[in-house]
Amino acid sequence: MTVDRDYMLRKRGGPSAPKFFLDTQVVPRLVDAAGGAEVALDRAARASGVRPSLLLAGAAGALSLAAVRALRGALETRRAERLRNEDAVAVDRSGIEAEMRAG
């Protein structure tokens, strides 16, 4: 798109609806959440006497460990379910083969 001389004359006033929503709803809430996390981190650092960077690194490590454990558990559950389904299919096949031999 090229911007010609009359672009500003034709442009609607104000931002688009999605930009307005982001600027008035989403961004302020994210900034408030980040500020709250910063205050909590600062208070925890003062109370414990540990540098904030070490507290942040520990929290990130704990969250990543929890995520890995959750993912590993979900994968093991999926694998166990798949093995149960394969065993059920194998039992059905052996039953069908036995019926074919008998019949």
Image (cartoon, rainbow, N blue to C red):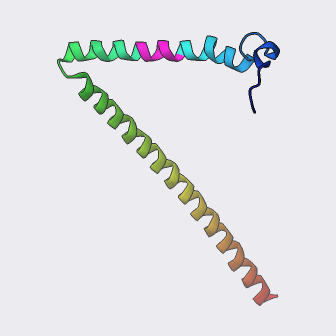
Q: Does residue 80 sit above or below 94 in this rendering?
A: above
- x, y percent for residue 10: 82, 16
- Residue 33 drawn in magenta: yes
Q: Nearer the viewer, residue 38 or 65?
A: 38
Question: Who's the residue at 63% across and 11% down the image?
Answer: 24
Q: Residue at x 26, y 26 (%)?
A: 53
Q: Quadrant of residue 101?
A: bottom right
Front residue (pair 82, 29): 29
- Which portion, as a residue range, is magenta? 30-35
62 relative to 52 in the view: left or right = right
Tell me if residue 19 comes above or below residue 78 in the rendering: above
Which quarter of the picture shows residue 89? bottom right
Q: Position of residue 25 (x, y in %)?
A: 62, 13
Q: How many marks?
A: 0
Residue closest to the far left: 49
Q: Quadrant of the C terminus?
A: bottom right
- x, y (%) of residue 20? 68, 14
Viewer-proximal residue among 39 and 11: 11
Residue 76 is covered by the magenta coloring? no
**Res 5 → quadrant:** top right
Q: Main secondary structure of the magenta part?
A: helix
Instruction: Give x and y (percent) for residue 83.
Output: 57, 64
**Residue 98 horizontal side relative to residue 63, left or right:** right
For the point 64% across and 18% down, which residue is it?
A: 22
User: Measured along the vertical axis of the image, is residue 68 above or below residue 84?
Assistant: above
Q: Considering the image in quadrants, where does the N terminus appear?
A: top right
Q: Residue at x 42, y 13 (%)?
A: 35
Height in image: 4 above or below 13?
below
